[in-house]
Image: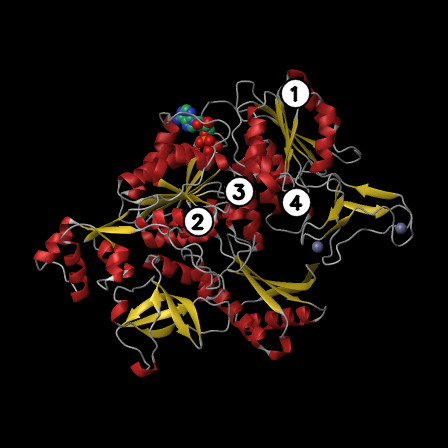
Amino acid sequence: MIAKVEPLTQARALRGPFDYLLGGSMEGVGVGSVLTIPFGNRRMLGVVVEVAEESELPPERLAEPLSALEADVPPELVSLGLWVAQEYVSTPARGLSLVLPPGTGTGVAKPTAARRSLAATLTASGREALGGTTERLGPRQRAALEALAGGPRRVGDLAREGVTDHAGIRRLEARRLVELADTAEAPRRPEVRAVGARGPKAEPTEAQAGVLARIVERMDRPDPGRHLLLHGVTGSGKTEVYMRAVAAAIERGRSAIVLVPEIALTPQTAGRFVDRFGDTVAILHSRLTARERFDEWSRLRRGDARVCVGPRSAIFAPLTDVGLIVVDEEHDSSYKQEGDPRYDARRVAERRAETAGAVLLAGSATPRPESVLRYERLRLHDRVDGRPLPPVEVVGMTGVQDALHAHTRQALDEVRRAGGKAIVLLNRRGWSNFLTCRSCGRVWECPRCDVTLVLHRAAGRVSCHHCGHSERVPGSCPDCASVTLARHGVGTEQLGAELERLMDPLPVFRLDADTVAGEGVGPALERFDSADAGVLVGTQMVAKGHDFPDVTLGVVLDADATLRFPDFRAEERTFALVAQLAGRSGRGSRGGRVVVQALDPDARALRHAALHDAEGFLEGELGRREALGYPPHGHLIRVVCAAREPGPEAEAAAAVCELAGLYGAAALGPAPLFRRKGWERAQLVVKSAQREPAIAAVRRAVEEVSSARAHAGVTFAVDVDPQ
Ligand code: ADP
Ligand code: ZN
Ligand code: ZN
């Protein structure tokens, strides 16, 4: 037999897969097996992507794999990884690395091994197979079953005796002829702490029951049909619907994946799933240790856990028989991966659901126009507790010098006097966003990026939010020696200090990337949750799906800041930010209100957000997108070229632009981008109604330009569906 193997290499140029001869000891190797292979004069890890009877090469020219890893990947995930590579203009190795057991990486790191010893037991069908003729058994498979006829054996021992190896036993397990069980150390479960309100398992409301019935009905169809979008206001009980839908999938003997935005930011949702499903749930997130991640992965792979809850990478959970994929807070930008492959977990979820015959259920209070147009919408119009959404006031900041409008101060003061709770959102961390010299006008900028340095007062430093460069706060101007420096703009650090003064004696809790660097988000949320009164101030982290019943005031500062950047998603983001923050307020009996500060209080996104008018906003947004050919009415592909010296990046971008056009994908640009981490950058954007041909054209153009000697030293990043 021949195994076609994709080597796990960083190299872009390599054209796999490569053929390897499967000798006797490699029996049981199949699609999804991870092999150590000789490659040139090195050894490497590789993934079997196909098994064939013969090779085009003569047998004497074929090498044999050296060994097979114990952990392997379900074949359907091999296809998914390769699809991602194709769809996002990456390499097979990088696509496959997404679906591999944690720790396998791209063959650089030593793979993690399970700290356990497996025991194999013959099942009833295994016994039958030994006696009868119903199952086809190879001689080695028969030998393995015979070795188990006398009772359970450790798989490691069978391998040492040469009876079979792990892969062989896995195949028998897949055919349900043997059962595998841990005999040693139980996997370590990561701890997930829930914060905020957590109700007992409640009877679904009529609205929830109606929605649920339609989801479950899909599960029982052979083809679940169109993807579903659960559009429900904040607090309408979406999470409860997800949990019951997951239970329905498990009852049907199927498994489920629940994607949530970054778990560190939203420990609450994951906690609710663990509460409800216990050990049936595996959690995969970035704060796990390598060992925990591997153990959780293995529990999923073995089928001990049937539900995977995790951030975007959980879409590659090694589950089989997936019946349901939930994408919670589907508008969240964390579903897009920033490094190559720049996949969008929401699109990968569509693909996985389609190939697995699973129901895809995306949910949000502020769904993307993409999903509204393409999915079938289920609505939850009201909050579970029947309370209205809080009134939202938008106040104009033109001519106002202070960070806080008089109206906002007054609202905050009411909270202070009542001893209540408020959340204040300002999407900018640090003390001031830039420093200038009062005499010569010098602006402190990052030496490696074309952006200003942000003052962090407590740390005594000015730092770059793009590359991490930081230096001590200057005492004087290096250009003119003046010691009078001006600070401009307000960040969360300064706002927190101001609120401490304003809200005294109420405590102020700050939540931004600076405060969570050490301890994570959980502790800060817990402190705010358990305090009787206080203010939570921070970046957009404070607006994620937290559920605090006693918050009566939400404030958004500089709500239209995003609108001042040229980004076609700016309006969608602004609307979502305000609507999500509003969703944190007024969840308790004391009601609530929201104050939004903006330079332009009449901005469309803000007007609709103030009226809780998602429908009106979406309608306008879809119309605008259609007129401009933006998603979901067109597809965008962005190519960023970067070089160490100014010049080559622009030439390369121009070359890609021209070739892409030649291959049928007209591109806009090239346009310069601001310098980042010392890289000069230029970008071009392809906008096309035809997705696949556009991707193919860009791939071809980039491959040609990147392999041309004239453009050596330029790096290329392709981003399909940029955020
Ligand atoms: P969403 O995800 O839509 O924001 P949640 O699922 O978090 O809403 O529900 C909001 C609150 O209502 C939670 O505290 C939850 O426990 C509670 N809840 C949800 N469904 C019910 C129900 N059927 N009966 C009573 N309480 C419920
Ligand atoms: Zn100066
Ligand atoms: Zn920088």
Mark positioned earlier in the residue sequence (1 or 3)? 1
Identity, as a three-letter code, of the amino acid under mark 1 = Val
> Going from the N terminus, do you reach mark 1 or mark 2 first?
2
Callout 4–callout 3 Cβ contact below 8 Å = no
Compute the Cα span from label 2 to label 3: 47 Å
In the picture, measured across the screen, residue 398 lies left or right of residue 35, that is: right
Disc 4 versus disc 2: distance between alpha carbons?
Answer: 40 Å
> Vertically, is 357 above or below 268?
below
Answer left or right for 655 relative to 444: left
Q: Which residue in the structure is indicated by mark 2?
A: 291
Above or below, 48 against 518 in this view is below
Image quadrant of ligand 1?
top left
Residue topped by disc 1: 415
- In terms of sequence position, does the residue under pointer 1 or pointer 4 come before the other? 1
Determine the residue positioned at 19% across, 59% down.
144
Q: Amino acid at mark 3?
A: Glu
Where is residue 299 drawn, in percent x and y?
Answer: 35, 47
Rounded to the nearest angstrom, the CA distance separating label 1 from label 3 is: 36 Å
The residue pinned by badge 3 equals 619
- Which residue lies under the disc numbered 4? 562
The percent coordinates of residue 208 (x first, y second) are 38, 30
Closer to the observer: label 2 or label 3? 2
Mark closer to the observer (1, 2): 2
Distance from Cα at disc 1 to Cα at disc 4: 28 Å
Going by the numbered disc 4, the residue's amino acid type is Thr
